[in-house]
Amino acid sequence: MNDAADQIFATLKQSAQSGAPLYLQLRKSIEDAVNRGLIGPGDALPSERDIATKADISRVTVRKAVQDLVKGGILVQRHGSGTFVAPRMERVEQSLSRLTSFTEDMARRGMAVRSAWLDRGLYAPSPDEMMVLGLSSSELVARVARLRIANDTPLAIERASLSASVLPDPAGIGSSLYTALELTGNRPVRAVQRISAANLGDSDARLLEVPPGIAGLHIERISYLASGKVIEFTRSIYRGDAYDFVAELRLTGPSEEGRP
């Protein structure tokens, strides 16, 4: 990327008198170059020393700008190899109006899907699980935690809790929890989801292969049977750079306002 690098850092020199901190100017120059396609996914950046020389700034300034871009998911650092432009994620759109499993969702898109099991077991319920699932302290809860992967890219961490009476053998689940629930007549038919922004902690970021602190989506879902009974309590973390949740909204007429 020699020509592109020269162009990026020449632009930085020209704007050095703008008054903005130099590390912010360098960060913006590199980010603009990525967005304009001057440097693409997988391209290596010059070393800190080379960048400092080309842009006539200190290596401390270069390091601060690069670390900001790594935290933002624009760049990735590989120990012993250098700094590279991060792979561009193909964003996945998921409708909020349909209750489907991750496996079904990805299959409809023609994506190869698999899961890495993080936990499958029976435990004493937490206060939240007792309240949501209607369990007593003497009952057990089945916890199923999985790293969901599509086309070899980790997209989400799902942690589901169900009553042990519904799922007495969580270790026996195959590729889809909803398929297992359907076999016993316990597949949910509706759910309420709450979505909020979250900065990923170290362990979740490591599983999703993103920098710690990067933006993600925290989704809490309570799923119900047709009878109205709560069947599943799921808390998930989705990659913010890979997922878009889409909802269809309809304008109600005067006669429909106030309807439940």
Image (spheres, rainbow, N blue to C red):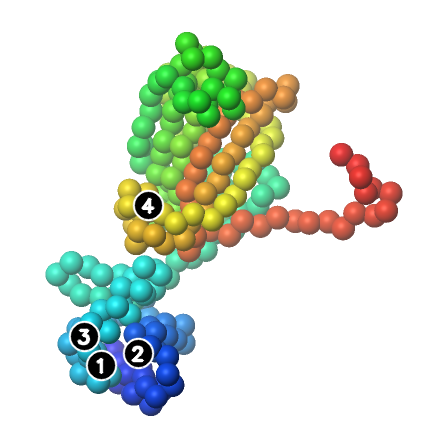
* 14 with respect to 230 (left or right): left
Residue 181 spot, x, y in % from top left: 49, 22
- Mark 1 lies on a secondary structure that is loop
Residue 22: numbered disc: 2
Height in image: 62 above or below 97? below
User: Quick one: label 1 or label 4, which is nearer the N terminus?
Assistant: 1
Q: Which residue is mark 3?
A: 59
Q: Which residue is mark 4?
A: 201
Residue 112 visible: no
Q: For residue 33, what is the image quadrant? A: bottom left
Q: For residue 65, what is the image quadrant? A: bottom left
* 232 with respect to 16 (left or right): right
Crowding at mark 1 (Cα within 10 Å: few <14, some 14-19, many 20+) = some
User: Quick one: label 4 or label 3, which is nearer the N terminus?
Assistant: 3
Front of the two marks 4 and 2: 2
Kind of residue indicated by mark 4? Gly
Residues under numbered marks 1 and 4 in contact, where contact means CB atoms less than 8 Å apart = no
Report how far apart the C-alphas of labels 1 and 4 lie in the structure. Answer: 32 Å
| Quadrant of the drawing holding the N terminus | bottom left
Kind of residue indicated by mark 3? Arg
User: Quick one: label 2 or label 3, which is nearer the N terminus?
Assistant: 2
Q: Which residue is mark 1?
A: 57
- Mark 4 lies on a secondary structure that is loop
Kind of residue indicated by mark 1? Ile
* 44 with respect to 196 (left or right): left
* 166 with respect to 66 (left or right): right
Query: 58 or 206, which lies in front?
Result: 58
Height in image: 225 above or below 75? above
